[in-house]
Image (cartoon, rainbow, N blue to C red):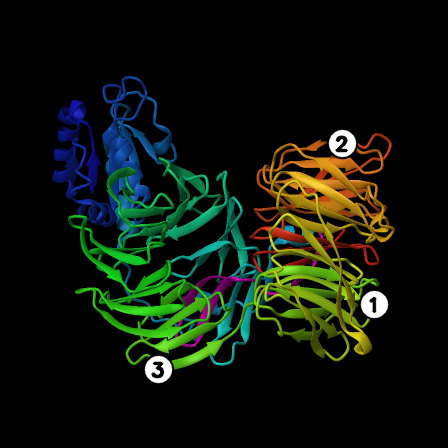
Amino acid sequence: MLFIAVPEDLPVVQGLVSRLQIDGFAITLVSQLPDLGASPRIWRETLAQARAVVFCLSRRSMPNDQPPSLVSSLTELLNLTPAPHRFVVTLKLTSCTLPASLRATPTLDLFSARSYERFRDLLHNHLATTATPPPVTAPETPAAPSHPALVPEGSFALDELEAHGLLRRLGRGVPRALFLIDQAHALVISGGGPVLLALGDGTPRWAIDHPTHCASLSPSGQLLALAAGTRIMLWELANGQLHSICSGHTGMIQSLAFAPDERLIASGGRDRRVRLWRLSAGQPVVLATLPEHSDTVTALAFNADGTLLATGSADQSVRIWRTFDRVLIQTLAGHGGTVEALAFSPDKTLLAAGSRGRRVRLWETATWKLRVTLEGHEGAVETLAFAPTGDMLATGATDGTLRLWQTATGALLRIVGQHQNPLTSTTFSPDGSLIASLGEDNRLHVWQTASSAHITSLRPLSGRVTSLTLNTEGTLLALGSSEGAVTIHELTAEGGTRIRQQDHVGPIISAAFYEPDHLITAASDRTIRACTTTTGASRILWQTHGSNRVACLASNGRLLACTDGTGTVQLWRITPAETAAGGQFWRVLRGLQGRPRLIRFDAQCQAIFVATDESAIQIWHLNDLEAERERSSQHLPCQGEEIRSLGTSLDGRLLAIGSSEGTIQLWHRQEHRTLGILEGIESAVTSLTFAGGDHTLVAGDAEGRLHFWRITQRNWRPRRTNLIHAHAGTIEHLLYNANQQHLISGSRDGTVRIWKA
């Protein structure tokens, strides 16, 4: 047993300890603040082995009703060192007020009648009930799965998505993280949430629909932390149920890490802060907030016994914190770029840090001296992992390569394989026999660690959504992706995918249906193509001179507006028919104030809007252009903020302008006046649309949220009505399907969601 007492109370406590020792108790008395920094492991082991801990308090030790530092320190350490049979009791030597941290413990007054006998019996009873019972032979039962993630079956979803009217999700999303559960299963985390895949054929065993920006799996596999925006959701994998929600960050969360004992989870993000959350059966609470980095916190890692936490940042530094008292003990600089990945070796002797400086640094934790710098990658190092034995380090980078290094010498062992795009995650199997990688080419590769023999290759994910368009009837939805693919989904009751084509070699910038049987696509590969919606046959209509990075097709597929980045916009007429397929140059739009950054047609294809880098909008009416009228354009000044999105009402009267500062300007086009500015969005407004017969304005922001306003035509004063945490990435596309009264959102997280409007 451990007795905790301050020096002022030692005379009384030493007498009590002597009596208890005569009665057969083994006691260790602690009266000074332990040197936790020099010997954290010893103190953690001491507290873990103690079957009873007694805090002795008096008015002398708490003159201002404040607990002494000895009591506060050891109370905190007890919370970080769980032991199922440990008994904690508070003994009041005199009348005093208990600190909040001890109010839930059993309390005895030593100054009351027969207090010693009651205290002695309390300790005897506890020791007797926690004695190790004899082994009992239990009937044989079927062996349980070796990992909690292997238990669930089926599909799960975040309840609040369905509560907000989510009808359907298209695509699993872009890659986020990867965990090898065993030699036959991989847990893949994407923008749409986690899915457990069988490595043999890629069959999903279960999936959770949950927008996800970053993730962390607890060491035991019991909990999976998923973060999107400023919130963390903790899921119990044994039953697929949501455990709890952590809220408190003021910027998007970029990194997560579980402590080895799973009592703590660390989170960091764009608000530059690191928060430590204490996990319990109830709602997690913030244990501490570490002092700010000077930029976004991008990487986190605990060492093997949880005594140290490493935090990496876009400020190019790594900070080392002692988790018990949150003291900063070291700062490691010189990484040459944002620190993207951190990992401690299993034996706690090394810390690996990968950065955008294209290198990995190995630091010795005993002295915090640099052991070796690993060089050879031709891109930013995005992910790294130690083998379970600690003798090998795997690193993945934006150059698409996965490299294995010897940790003792820093020698490159081999390049295991290569993705076509940057790697996002790499991991070893629990026994170290397999290594896997996940890349932005949406592929999952698995190799044997010893021989680098390729085991399997799966393509479980979808690329980033770069364009969305509906046909006139609202029955077909076309998705363009960052990998140059286009997919047409049927929005009928039966649903399903009609066709999928990948004829472009660059991201699709814009798409539109031309009548019922053709889909027109414009891509960054400078080509304009037509795809037949019934057969999937595709052909090039023409090739432009510019890159089409700023381009827009009219919703009827008959016009293309594009720019090569100079101060002009080119208009093309489109004819996809077999007899005269191609594009005909129509005219050039001049007189812009600045370079074009955004081009949009209105809903009726009667006007074209061009926003420039000078925060101005130029409007051309197509009828005026057809009639060659001299005054064919209209200038619309904005308030000096970068314009990120435009949306027009179906009747053409209203124009909404979204900015990088989170504001929306609402204009009445016919009256050429502003109707007000909508505020309260904490990030850039990246997409806009009108819905419900133009009575609702919907905005998507850079952190994946949907904002709703109800518009009253009597006084044109919008009223905010709803907020949905819809995606785990920037919402770049919004459509309203008037025929089915559905809202469709597309995000950089690689998913499209269809909502009941």
Image position, residue 501 (x, y; %): 65, 75
Name the residue at 42% across, 45% down.
Answer: 268
Query: Which one is earlier in the sequence, the residue at label 2 or at label 1?
Result: 1
Seen from the viewer's position, the closer of residues 120 and 751 is 751
Seen from the viewer's position, the closer of residues 104 and 589 is 589
Query: Which one is earlier in the sequence, the residue at label 3 or at label 2?
Result: 3
Name the residue at 23% across, 19% down.
Answer: 60
Query: Which one is earlier in the sequence, the residue at label 1 or at label 3?
Result: 3
Mark 1 or 3: in front is 1
Name the mark on residue 316.
none
In the rendered image, which residue does mark 3 sit on?
A: 453
In the rendered image, which residue does mark 2 sit on?
A: 674
Region rendered in magenta: 164-189
Among the 4 quarters of the image, the one containing residue 427: bottom left
Seen from the viewer's position, the closer of residues 683 and 189 is 683
Amino acid at the residue labelled 1: Glu
Q: Secondary structure at mark 2?
A: strand
